[in-house]
Amino acid sequence: MNFIRFQDLCAQGKAKNQRVFIRADLNVPQDDSGAITEDTRIRASIPCIQMALDAGAAVLVTSHLGRPTEGEFKPEDSLAPVAKRMAELLGRDVPLVANWTDGVSVAPGQLVMLENCRLNKGEKKNNEELAKKMAALCDIFVHDAFGTAHRAEASTYGIAQYAKIASAGPLLAAEMDAISKALTAPKRPLVAIVAGSKVSTKLTILKSLANNVDQLIVGGGIANTFMLAAGLKIGKGLAEPDLLNEAKAVIDAMKARGAEVPIPVDVVTAKEFKADAVATIKKATEVADDDLILDIGPETAKKLAQQLKAAGTIVWNGPVGVFEFAAFENGTKEIARAIAESSAFSIAGGGDTLAAIAKYGIEKDVGYISTGGGAFLEVLEGKTLPAFEILQKRANG
C-alpha cells in the first residue's frame, strides 16, 4: 500500500513548526464515576504524539469517547479524564479545548487535546463544511486510530480529504503494513482460522477468504455448521442449518482451487454448557443427540497444529473452543502454541482472540496483533477501509 508515513515527514524535518492534527483512538473504558479502568489506548497513542513534539510541531490531538449525541455536551462525554491520564504519561500539561472547530491557538512544542470529536454536529455523516474546518486547523493530518478506519467520518475521512498533507501515524501504518503482508502479498501457504458462534456473522469473511487462502480452519459454532454440511451429526450444538448451502459453497470453492476446509475428525463433548461439565473425547462420527461440542479433539488439534507450523502466513480470528473452561481449552491452546512456534508471519485480531493470546502468553510470538475489532473484520471481508482508501488517494496526488 502506498501512503505517506508521518514518521517519514518527521525524519525529513517537514513537521517542524507545522500544525499537526492527530486523530487518535482514546476511547477507553470508564467506571460509573468516570475513572479510567484500562488505559492501553492512551499509552498506545503516546509514540505518535511524542514523535510530533520531538519534531518541533504544534500538536492537536482528538478522539471520540463513548456515543455522545452530536451538539449536546454532557460531562460524561468529556475527554477530561483522558487528558489528565495523558498528562501523567507525558509528564507535561495537556490542556483540553472545547468548541474548537473555528480555531485553536497552539505553538510549536505545545500539545492541546481537542474535546470529544463526536460532539461536533456532522461528525458521523462526514459533513463537508465540518471536515473543511478541521482541515483548516492543520498543516499535516495524521490518522492514527485503526479502530475507526472502517468509518468515513469528518475526523477520519473528510479531514484527510482536505488537509494540505494527510498521513498515517505509526499505529495505523503498522496495521496497513501487516494487513498488506498477510492478505495482499502473502507468503504461502496462507492459512486462516475463523471461529465464532455463528456462520451468519462471519459469512462474508468466509466467502472472501475462500477465494484467497490455502486452508480455512473453522472453529466454535461455525465448525458445527460445516460439520453438518459434511454430513456429520452435531448433537444439540449451536448451528445454523439454514446456511448449510452457504457452508457447502465455501467448501466447494476451496476444493475447486485445491484448497481445503479441514473438518474435525474428533471433538470434545459435554452434556451441558458448564465449566465443571464432564468432558468426553469422541470421534466426530460418534456424537450423540444430547451432546454439546465444546472443543476440537486432540487428534484434530494435532493435525491443525502441523498445518499451522508449515504455513507461510496465518490469519487468526477466534478461538476454536470454549477456552474459558479448562476442560475445553486444549484446541485453542494447541493452535495458539502452533502459531507461536510457526515461522509464518501471523496476524491476529478480535476480542476473544486477544484474550486467548494473553491467556497463553504468546504476545511476542504473534507477528502482528490487530487492535481494531470491526476494522479488522471488514479487512477480512475483503473490503477497502475508508481510511486506507483516502490516505492512498492523497499519497498518489
Image (cartoon, rainbow, N blue to C red):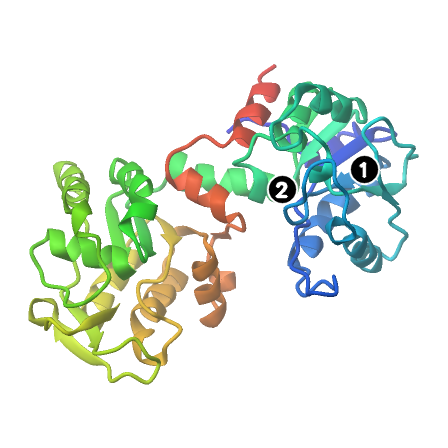
Q: Residue at x 66, y 55 (%)?
A: 28
Residue 29 image point, x, y percent: 65, 59
* Figure check: 100 above or below 146: above
Q: Is residue 13 left or right of residue 23?
A: right
Amino acid carrying label 2: it is: Ala
Q: Residue 129: give its label.
A: none
* Badge 2: residue crowd in 10 Å (few <14, some 14–19, many ≥20): many
In this rendering, does residue 260 appear at all?
no
Front in this rendered view, residue 125 or 148: 125
Which of pointers 2 and 1 lies earlier in the amino acid sequence?
1
* Relative to 298, 24 lies left or right: right
Which quarter of the picture shows residue 123? top right
Please, what secondary structure does the residue beneath circle 2 have?
loop
Q: State how far apart marks 2 and 1 are (Cα).
A: 14 Å
Name the residue tied to disc 2: 145
Q: Tell me the residue that label 1 is attached to.
A: 60
Looking at this view, name the residue that lies furthest to the top. Answer: 397
Which residue is at a point 36% across and 62% down the rendered structure image?
Answer: 319
The answer to whether one can see residue 175 in this image is yes
x and y, in percent, of residue 262 in the image = 18, 55
